[in-house]
């Protein structure tokens, strides 16, 4: 019997198979990587945040005057970054020491044995270099973080077998927070300290004695504000923010007025510690373990200004008994 010409031929096994979906490009993100932040994005956002923090710092040092902020930024753009990091070293060192220990314990199963000596060196060196008083504050933050971890663990176990969707969502949220409480609390503590010392300049204070008085402010600062009042001073505390062979730019400590002083007019300048602006010093843990008391090499600026009151311009420094 002959086959009918219109009879359908059975499909071959190859044609019956569904076609394979096209392969995605090699550089396309995997489904499980969708929504994740890349390293490049982290670096970009981190750089932008650092620049923003430096601008906020300059704004605070200038006592929230855009004119002073612009003058400071134009005078020392690089010095702002390095100086800001330096003045917060009292808090950065304990944060690095305690943070290294915290995450080393949390991710101990992922750390290669060859990296443990490096982790120990970083933790020990930064801890020994940390000022004792500020290290204790860091330990207080760690203690709060341990308490927060205990609370998180308690509620996760409490909702572990719950079928309530709200409890399930909360448990997943707590799972994302677990182990990171020290980061949130530490960041909050650093942010508070940053705002608390926002007007602290990034350079060391100096007590100046001038042979020719220079203008320290041009308007009333208390009563009858915004009224013209040009006041010259020959003894004052300031922060040198820029310097050339002929000119010295100083930020007055009290008025935050930008002073331009000829180098020839500077009779004496002595480095001091401004108790009103700068962080109080303390001996590091290494010196505390040795039993050595802290002895700052820089006296209070008020005492230095009082000392310069006994000196006449052009005369040698007096020896007080």
Image (tube, grey):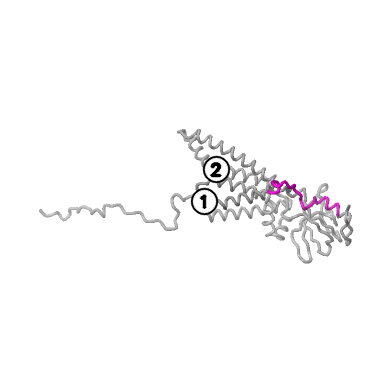
x, y (%) of residue 229? Answer: 84, 53
Q: Are marks 1 and 2 in contact (CB under 8 Å)?
A: no
| Magenta stretch contains residue 292 | yes
- The one nearer the camera, 149 or 211, is 149
C-alpha span from label 1 to label 2: 22 Å
- Residue 113 is marked as 1
Span highlighted in magenta in the image: 286-307
Residue 280 percent location from the top left of the image? 74, 47
Q: Work out which residue is located at the far left of the displayed protein and give it.
A: 1
Q: Is residue 209 magenta?
A: no
Mark 1 or mark 2: which comes first in sequence? Answer: 1
* 71 on left or right of 264: left
> Which residue carries the number 2 mark?
179
Q: Residue at x 37, y 56 (%)?
A: 22
Extreme residue toward the front, this view = 290
Q: Nearer the viewer, residue 164 or 305?
A: 305
Residue drawn at (31%, 54%), measured in percent from left and top?
19
Whether residue 312 is situated above or below residue 170 in the rendered picture: below
Q: Residues within 10 Å of mark 1 (few under 14, many from 20)?
A: few
Q: Secondary structure at mark 1?
A: helix
């Amino acid at each position: 019997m002959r086959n009918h010409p219109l009879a359908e031929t059975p499909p071959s096994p190859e044609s019956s198979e569904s076609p394979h979906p096209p392969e995605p490009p090699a550089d396309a993100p995997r489904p499980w990587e969708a929504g994740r932040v890349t390293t490049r994005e982290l670096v970009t956002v981190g750089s932008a945040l650092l620049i923003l923090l430096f601008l906020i710092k300059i704004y605070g040092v200038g006592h929230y005057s855009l004119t002073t902020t612009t003058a400071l930024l134009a005078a020392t753009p690089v010095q702002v970054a390095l100086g800001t990091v330096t003045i917060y070293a009292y808090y950065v060192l304990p944060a690095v020491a305690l943070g290294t220990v915290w995450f080393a314990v949390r991710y101990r199963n992922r750390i290669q044995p060859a990296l443990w000596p490096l982790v120990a060196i970083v933790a020990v060196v930064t801890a020994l270099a940390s000022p004792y008083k500020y290290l204790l504050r860091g330990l207080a933050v760690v203690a709060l973080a341990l308490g927060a971890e205990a609370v998180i663990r308690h509620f996760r176990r409490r909702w572990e077998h719950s079928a309530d969707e709200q409890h399930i969502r909360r448990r997943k949220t707590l799972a994302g927070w677990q182990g990171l409480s020290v980061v949130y609390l530490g960041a909050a503590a650093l942010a508070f300290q940053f705002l608390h010392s926002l007007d602290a300049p990034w350079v060391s204070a100096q007590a100046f004695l001038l042979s020719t008085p220079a203008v320290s402010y041009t308007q009333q600062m208390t009563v009858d504000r915004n009224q013209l009042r040009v006041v010259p001073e020959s003894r004052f505390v300031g922060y040198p923010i820029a310097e050339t062979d002929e000119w010295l730019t100083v930020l007055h400590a009290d008025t935050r007025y930008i002073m331009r002083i000829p180098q020839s007019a500077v009779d004496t300048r002595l480095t001091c510690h401004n108790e009103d602006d700068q962080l109080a010093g303390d001996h590091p843990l290494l010196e505390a373990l040795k039993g050595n008391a802290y002895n700052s090499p820089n006296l209070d600026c008020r005492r230095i200004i009082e000392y310069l009151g006994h000196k006449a311009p052009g005369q040698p420094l007096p020896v007080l008994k």
